[in-house]
């Protein structure tokens, strides 16, 4: 008998496993039995964790059916994986005695092996930095209080870059003992870090970078959802007369609250007091809306950028201003927004939580302190951080043609390095962390 860790699924089709998160539907069966390639229903979700663990080619992991599990039979550890939809409110998965395991009809035997023997449960929610107090409380309540699992048997895979610091503070504030029974196993994995590897494998995948050409626009800034820091940044660009020198997408409707427009999101007092912005700049920006670039509406296309469809916008601009999901929260998010520029060999400024650039460095990326002040990444106060970011943006707005060309020439080695990081991005480090947890190392 080998010592591979088993990745356990309730349903396995000829072409791979079907996710455990709920009972399979006809689309699941079509894809895993008939090999249907184009499934476009936004209600369909699939589980890529078998590929994540490289089941079939990995010396450490293999796919295994739950029907073959036995009490006190195979002593090898196993993982029961669940991928959560980010469109479903988190607490719905952990609703007391009618939560995730009940809804997915997980066998009682599997629950018993997780509770008392060699089983682990993996919750994959890595698409964003889902690590706030509500998320942690839901996991503790359901798996600890209701299910009575030793909490270290629950591996929570999150996109939050500073997840362990956030969790440590949560536990410390509440006096939760630092032992295997009371604390979850937290693993950071910003899934978008590896999402663009396939883009770099396409024909003509490598983006051109002409060091002797000045792009027609300075900044590229994508914004799909209305968030306060995006509004603040956009209006600041207006005040610096940089909107016309940029390519910006910006809606006049609130995606999260249908029927509400951007006027409901403006905090005039804050914009005036913290950023010294007059109403005339706010009104001027509002009159421009909506600002549309590619017109894409499919969320998967926007996140994955299939076919490198947005390349022309990077080619037309000098620098990306990345408006990350989080800015005012304590959880650091690095989503596809932060990794797209490196895929396109584009310099970037990240408007995110303090520590976002540090997180990029930890993933192997180089940033641009040689060319502008990146100390904004260390500023905890939100208003001060935004003002520091705008100071950098405003300074770049004064660059002469000669300085832009000098920048293009000198920055290229960093862009080449970052592109190689994207091209060779791997799940190996994250999988190794999970392996150590499961093997008790």
Image: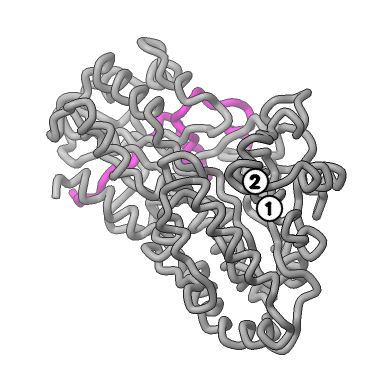
Task: Work out whether residue 344 or residue 60 is closer to the camera in this orientation and state it.
Answer: 344
Residue 213 visible here: yes
Residue placed at 37% from the left, 42% from the top? 157
Q: Which residues are magenta?
A: 1-30
Task: Work out whether residue 375 or residue 332 is closer to the camera in this orientation and state it.
Answer: 375
Residue placed at 80% from the left, 54% from the top? 294
x then y, percent, for residue 321: 63, 60
**Quarter residue 237 falls in:** bottom right
Q: Is residue 63 above or below residue 417?
A: above
What's the colour scheme?
one colour
x then y, percent, for residue 38: 70, 44
Residue placed at 44% from the left, 37% from the top? 130
Q: Is residue 236 above or below residue 317?
A: above
Query: Which element carries disc 1, helix, strand or loop?
Result: helix
> Is 16 positioned to the left or the right of 283 in the image?
left
Q: Badge 1, how many Cα within 10 Å: few under 14, some, many 20+?
A: many
- Residue wearing tag 2: 232
In the rendered structure, does residue 17 fall within the stretch colored magenta? Answer: yes
**Quarter residue 181 falls in:** top left
Task: Work out whether residue 221 or residue 29 is closer to the camera in this orientation and state it.
Answer: 221
Return the mark for residue 251: none
Residue placed at 52% from the left, 43% from the top? 326
* Pointer 2 with pointer 1, Cβ within 8 A: yes
**Quarter residue 415 falls in:** bottom right
Q: Badge 2, how many Cα within 10 Å: few under 14, some, many 20+?
A: many
Return the mark for residue 236: 1
Distance, label 2 to label 1, CA atoms, is: 6 Å
Query: Which element carries disc 2, helix, strand or loop?
Result: helix
x then y, percent, for residue 429: 33, 59
């Amino acid at each position: 008998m080998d010592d591979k860790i088993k990745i356990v699924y309730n349903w396995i089709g000829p072409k791979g496993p079907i996710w455990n998160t709920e009972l399979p539907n006809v689309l699941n069966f079509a894809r895993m039995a008939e090999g249907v390639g184009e499934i476009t229903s936004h209600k369909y979700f699939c589980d890529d964790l078998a590929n994540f663990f490289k089941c079939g080619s990995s010396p450490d992991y293999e796919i295994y059916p739950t029907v073959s599990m036995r009490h006190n039979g195979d002593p090898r550890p196993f993982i029961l994986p669940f991928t959560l939809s980010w469109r479903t409110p988190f607490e719905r998965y952990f609703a007391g005695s009618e939560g995730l395991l009940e809804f997915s009809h997980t066998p009682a035997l599997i629950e018993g092996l997780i509770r008392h023997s060699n089983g682990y449960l993996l919750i994959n929610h890595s698409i964003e930095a889902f690590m706030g107090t509500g998320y942690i409380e839901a996991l503790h309540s359901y798996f600890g209080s209701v299910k009575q699992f030793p909490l270290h048997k629950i591996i929570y895979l999150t996109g939050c870059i500073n997840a362990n610091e956030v969790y440590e503070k949560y536990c410390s504030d509440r006096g939760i003992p630092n032992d295997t029974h009371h604390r979850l196993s937290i693993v950071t994995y910003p899934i978008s870090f590896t999402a663009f590897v396939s883009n770099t494998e396409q024909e003509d995948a490598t983006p051109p970078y002409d060091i002797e050409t000045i792009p027609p626009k300075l900044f590229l800034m994508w914004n799909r959802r209305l968030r306060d820091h995006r509004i603040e940044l956009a209006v600041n660009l207006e005040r610096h007369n940089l909107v016309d020198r940029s390519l910006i997408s910006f809606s006049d409707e609130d995606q999260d609250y249908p029927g509400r427009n951007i006027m409901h999101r403006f905090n005039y007092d804050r914009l005036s007091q913290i950023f010294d912005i007059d109403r005339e700049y706010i009104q001027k920006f509002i009159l421009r809306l909506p600002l549309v670039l590619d017109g894409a509406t499919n969320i998967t296309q926007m996140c994955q950028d299939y076919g490198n469809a947005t390349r022309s916008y990077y080619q037309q601009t000098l620098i990306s201003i990345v408006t990350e999901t989080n800015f005012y929260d304590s959880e650091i998010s690095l989503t596809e927004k932060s990794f797209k520029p490196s895929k396109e060999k584009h310099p970037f400024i990240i408007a995110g939580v303090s520590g976002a650039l540090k997180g990029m460095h930890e993933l192997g990326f180089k940033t641009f302190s040689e060319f502008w002040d990146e100390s904004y990444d260390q500023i905890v106060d939100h208003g001060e951080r935004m003002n520091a970011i705008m100071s950098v943006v405003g300074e770049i707005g004064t660059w002469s043609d000669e300085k832009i060309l000098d920048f293009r020439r000198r920055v290229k080695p960093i862009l080449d390095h970052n592109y190689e990081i994207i091209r060779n991005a791997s799940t190996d480090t994250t999988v190794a962390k999970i392996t150590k947890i499961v093997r008790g190392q």
